[in-house]
Image (cartoon, rainbow, N blue to C red):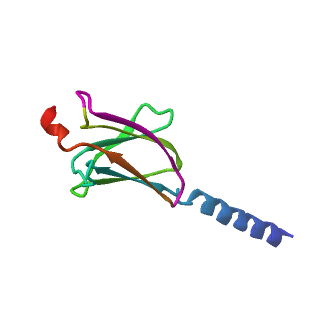
Amino acid sequence: MKRLSWLGLFFLIIISCKENTTKVETGTVLVKVVDLDGTLMANETITLKQENSESGLVKKTDKEGICRFNVKPGKYYVNAHLPGPGPSGKFYHTLVIVKENEMSQITLEACRECYKIQ
């Protein structure tokens, strides 16, 4: 009987240790910024904010016009202020739902010619 209770305790310890070391799964948000003609645009600032959060992650697009965010599953907003027609340009506030081990791709349109106007 004592042996059985020690064996049960051993398995409880093993199970609780395994639960505490489980890896938190993430998903990926891939943001591409393209010119009106489809050319990828580098060095554009993109913010990813989790729903109901004051702070966010900020990244710039790389030389291929892409940035990646690896985050926990949830609802996020992709925010950007990019050059576009008119004095204020284009504002984006696009909802994306991140699921674990999945990639969500967002493409934002900008205007390279509008840099000259502003």
The image shows residue 7, relative to residue 17, as above or below, that is below
Q: Position of residue 14 (x, y in %)?
A: 65, 66
The image shows residue 111, relative to residue 103, as above or below, that is above
Which residues, given as a range, are shown in magenta?
Answer: 86-101
Residue in view at x 57 percent, y 60 percent = 22
Query: Is 33 placed left or right of 22 in the picture?
Result: left
How many numbered discs, if any? 0
Q: Position of residue 88 (x, y in %)?
A: 26, 28
Q: Quadrant of the C terminus?
A: top left
Q: Position of residue 2 (x, y in %)?
A: 83, 69
Outermost residue on the left side: it is 116
Q: Position of residue 102 (x, y in %)?
A: 50, 59
Q: Nearer the viewer, residue 94 or 46?
A: 94
Outermost residue on the top side: it is 87
Q: Quadrant of the N terminus?
A: bottom right
Q: Nearer the viewer, residue 13 or 117?
A: 117
Q: Is residue 40 magenta?
A: no
Query: Which image quarter: residue 45?
Result: top left
Q: Nearer the viewer, residue 42 or 22?
A: 42
Residue in view at x 62 percent, y 59 percent = 19
Q: Is residue 98 magenta?
A: yes
Residue in view at x 65 percent, y 59 percent = 16
Residue in view at x 25 percent, y 49 percent = 35
